[in-house]
Image (cartoon, grey):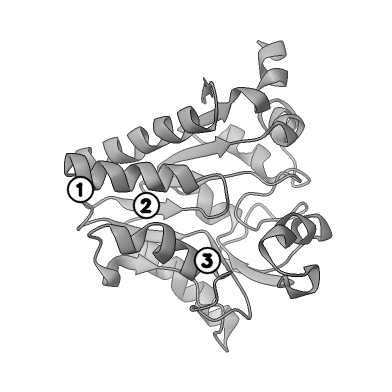
Amino acid sequence: MRIVIAKDYKDMSARAARIVAGQIYLKPNSILGLATGSTPLLMYKELIRVHKEVGLDLSEIVTFNLDEYLGLPKEDQQSYHYYMFHHFFNHINIKKKNIFIPDGMVQDVGQECKNYDENIKEMGGIDLQVLGIGNNGHIGFNEPDIKFEATTHKVKLDDETIHANARFFATIEEVPRFAISMGIKTIMHAKKVLLLVSGENKAEVLYHALYGGITPEIPASILQLHQDVTVIVEESAAHLLQQKS
């Protein structure tokens, strides 16, 4: 595991964008696993800049998003489908057929999850998976006590996650209670993992995820067993890691 301490959010995002861009330069048809939320926003903006100003070609990449809320249509501004198109896909030359995001309005959730994992497998597996980490240690929407062998599945969101995401909605009642998420097993099958950590409030959970026991109570702790993980953490979230070193 490689841990990189960035001076701030902008530096973290720039470093992350360079890693993703490097992956694409080396393998133009890379299969990317992508995350949403506030942490990767500036990374996406930087990738758009590199695409437009430097000529990074994104026409052959294939993307799989980590998760999607259940019950939100694609056009809902709080859906992750909307997030990805608004903040990234609409500004690059990716082929729409190469974009995979779970369908939050699907009737047969189990079949949707099965199809999602089959599509990843058919594409040859994820080359680089981008992750954030939740306040409770979740990656994707894999909440504490998730089974590590879980593939893409329906999840019930923890109260802590609902409260954390309420800032994106008008009221907490509007926050969906269920989602589709890649499972831990699906994430761990990625060839490379890039974990981005922003905010002083993530310092303690990050410390336990990287240096504590490997436990479903902190889903991100499983990354200790992955063969190729890069963690980019902004300085404000890294003070406990610095004490460890």
Number of the label disc, if any, that sits on residue 183: none
Q: Answer with left or right where residue 23 lies relative to residue 44.
A: left
Viewer-proximal residue among 115 and 158:
158
Mark 2, residue position:
32
Task: Give the SS element for disc 1.
Answer: loop
Mark 1, residue position:
28
The answer to whether mark 3 and mark 1 are in CB contact below 8 A is no
User: Label 2 neighbourhood size at 10 Å, few (<14), some (14-19), many (20+)?
Assistant: many
Q: Residue at x 52, y 47 (%)?
A: 188
Q: Answer with left or right where residue 159 lies relative to residue 57.
A: right
User: Label 1 neighbourhood size at 10 Å, few (<14), some (14-19), many (20+)?
Assistant: some
Q: Residue furthest bottom?
A: 107
Is 90 above or below relative to 115?
A: above
Cα–Cα gap, marks 3 and 1: 24 Å
- The type of residue carrying mark 3 is Tyr
- The type of residue carrying mark 2 is Leu
Mark 3, residue position:
80
Q: How many marks?
A: 3
Task: Give the SS element for disc 2.
Answer: strand
